[in-house]
Amino acid sequence: MPETFDAPLRALADTLTLEQKVRLLTGADVWSTAAEPAIGLRAMTLSDGPSGVRGPVWDERDPSLNLPSATALAASWDLDLTARYGATSAAEARRKGVHVVLGPTINLHRSPLGGRHFEAFSEDPMLTGALAAEYVLAVQRHGIGATPKHYVANDFETERYTADVALDDRALHELYLAPFEAAVAAGAWLVMSAYNAVHGVTMTENALLTTPLRTHWYFDGVVVSDWTAVRSTVAAACADQDLVMPGPDGPWGANLVAAVRAGAVPEARIDAKVLRLLRLASRVGALDVGGLDGDGTELGDSTTNGLPETARSAPYAERLGRDVAREVAAAGMVLVRNNGELPWPATGPGTIAVIGEAASHPRTQGGGSATVVVTETVSPLDGLRAALPGATVRAHPGVPVQTGLHPLPLTAMTDPVSGKAGLRARFLDDDGVELLSEHRTAAQLVYLGTVPDGAATIELSTGYTPDPESDDLRLGVAGVGPTRLELDAEVAFERVLGGAGTALGAALLTPDVASVPVTSSERVAVVVRQRIPRGDGDAMGLVAITLGTAPARRDRTELIEAAAELARTSDAAVVVVGTSSETESEGFDRETLALPGAQDELVRAVAAANPRTVVVVNSGGPVLLPWRNEVAAVLLAWFGGQELGHALADVLLGDAEPGGRLPTTWPAEQDDVPVLSTTPVDGVLRYDEGIHIGYRAWLRAGRRPAYPFGHGLGYTTWHLADLALEAAADGSVEVGVSVRNTGDRRGKQVVQVYLSRSDSTVERPVRWLAGFATVFADPGHRKPVRITLAPRAFSHWDGEWQIEPGVFTIHVGTSVESLSLSTNVTVSTARWAAHGARE
């Protein structure tokens, strides 16, 4: 950071009173920072954004692009595609008036039971760090701040607000801090501090915010808290925590001013925080300070920050965003089994049975704060019908999976006040006085920071007309709190609804459901009243409620038999299985890796009826697939964003390569997983496995998963040869290999480089990822690949980064278990020598 640039920022800060400075360090509301017009500082808007940028409201009137989940992006192993994903996020942020995107999430997949698995990249720190760095660079290139989160060791959801993570320093530095170091090295402008504690100190007060973050990594940006994570005045203010969110209330404010006056907090601490906040404002164009950005270079127009003119055009940006979403979804799909079934010809099979609840109602994103409101979602059924107009595509819902509701469609609702399509939402106080009344065009509503003061009840009313072609439906409400449903002025039910997780925020995002059968096809007047719950969500004014339908409770055997019969009379069958909203979400961890409901029975019945059964797995993380060797093909589609259906059709028909490789290990049995627990004991979660998580733990335990880290089949074949090494003066090693496409169509391969050390005096993984490269080649073509292994790849942590001199083995292949090439390299702190190359 040039000292010449800090000088004008310091001069601005010096004009502020202590009260003004402290006011800047707590949010002005749920999503915005405080402005200070006296120094040209405007408010900055922050927004959740790992898989799309929601903006300051959770509202169908301001919809967002729903990009594929982080696991889908990570499965592409494609840094160029990650850059396009990041640029798309930046364009979306600019469109929605957002200055800071609260992502990427770069905690590790320590256990497959992690409920927020879908939102993080990988079980490997090197892969996670490479993707994080590319995302950060791409987002910030367009003047939008990126926020790697959650610093650090927030790899679980159970007791996440209070749990203390106990781990050794080597695991901390080599695994959990490493992705953050990579993101900071890429120039991240913010880092988000986590809820949990490490070594007994909550992260918003932890010395790790100083060392290594600021002292060793030279981070000059803002540490923003996770929402409500700051719980103290003095301890957090004395730490390198900069910005408390949300606001305007919180533990700082007048309390912090008093603490400074009393000498408990040095004013120099406040000045340093303010300087970093002003630096951020200058970088995102929210501060008038001589036209300079945070590195002392010229800024463009602060309303565009260098985005191409075409990217600022709303129709163009929307089309571009959808194209990127579709490309990422296909590139991240992992083909783990293919018994000659895929790809289909361009015309597809003549008749296709598309089976499963997720075929019509897929999960395109995980639950929790990362959720965005989308205009349109393309389901697998929609995508196949659009791609194959000449084929007969027949659908069956399979067996129930979701325990929640499908929101009422706009076409089925009439606002009783305006007469327009939609519903009427009202907030009432304790006396029933109306505080807010508004027309809404969606039946799934979330109010975050927009609940009127004094509101005690939310009321939804609409005229609901059931679809005459839909039978056996139930009408219900999802939410938290005392709830009453009236149909034509008659009470249908009145009960108290709860939700998943012990915290109110988690419960509201994964609420209980109450429903009643729909007995008529005539319009019915629907009124829902729900008391607004009180709890830790109050700080953010959080209300979430859904009015919707669910399938009637039908006999499971009958449903499976009908689905199997449809498959038997079709040329091919596609079964879409997946997790539910109570399986993968922020706020709680998973209890089992098994697919919910009777989906395993469904797959087996369909596969027995039709040998051409393709199973598409719609989950954000690993699930058990006990039938995996009984079907023709298995395709892991993750949470594929709003273009999931189109991307799936592209892959099934061979218009796109299933380009994914596993970013995390998929087990065959839950009992085989070496590192599983996400549950603290007496408030402490012990990472006793040390540096052995993910594939490292599988290798150490000598167990075979269903599908190993890095695995993926694609539609062509490959040959790797000509392994060679070249050592550089800086201690890095360049690995060269020749990659040839030996199949009959263009394809993609991910070349992976692992290290091992057989005679080490230091405890090490059996193998660890050291580098990778994504290769595209036409049939018969050979491409040279060069992958640089930095000295850090050979290093271990022992109070500092050290290299143990001696012989390391370099393995090159296409997964952690498929390594066809290897050679040795002798490493010392001063000299490197390669020898013994073999194929």
Image (cartoon, helix red, strand yellow):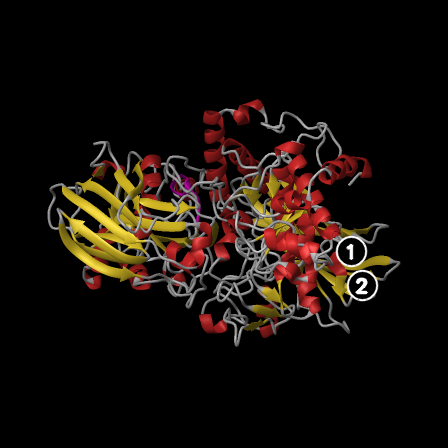
Q: Which mark is residue 741?
A: none
User: How far apart are labels 2 and 1 at the CA level?
Assistant: 8 Å
Q: How crowded is mark 2: few (under 14 residues within 10 Å), some or many (20 or more)?
A: some
State the extent of the magenta-drawn residues as a range. Answer: 637-646
Up-down relation of residue 551 to residue 683 (above or below): above
Question: Do the residues bearing badges 2 and 1 touch, measured as CB atoms within 8 Å?
Answer: yes
Q: Residues within 10 Å of mark 1 (few under 14, many from 20)?
A: some
Horizontally, is 419 left or right of 798 in the view?
A: left
**Residue on which disc 2 sits:** 803
Q: Which x, y percent locates residue 191? A: 63, 50
Q: Nearer the viewer, residue 6 or 692?
A: 6
Image quadrant in which you'd find residue 293 = top right
State which tag comes first along the sequence, 2 or 1. 1
Up-down relation of residue 141 to residue 208 (above or below): above
**Residue on which disc 1 sits:** 791
Residue at the spot x=59%, y=68% of the render?
165
Q: Which of 774 and 466 is in front in this view?
A: 466
Q: Is mark 2 on a helix, strand or loop?
A: strand
Q: Is mark 1 on a helix, strand or loop?
A: helix
Q: In which quarter of the image is the N terminus?
A: top right
Image quadrant in which you'd find residue 617 = bottom left
**Residue 819 seen in render:** no
The answer to if 48 sits in the magenta stretch is no
Horizontally, is 577 left or right of 527 in the view?
A: right
Principal SS element in the magenta part? loop
- Amino acid found under the numbered disc labelled 1: Pro
Q: Quadrant of the C terminus?
A: bottom right
Q: Which x, y percent locates residue 207? A: 70, 62
The answer to if 641 sits in the magenta stretch is yes
Q: Which residue lies furthest to the right in this view?
A: 830
Residue at the spot x=34%, y=45% of the render?
445
Horizontally, is 450 left or right of 756 in the view?
A: left
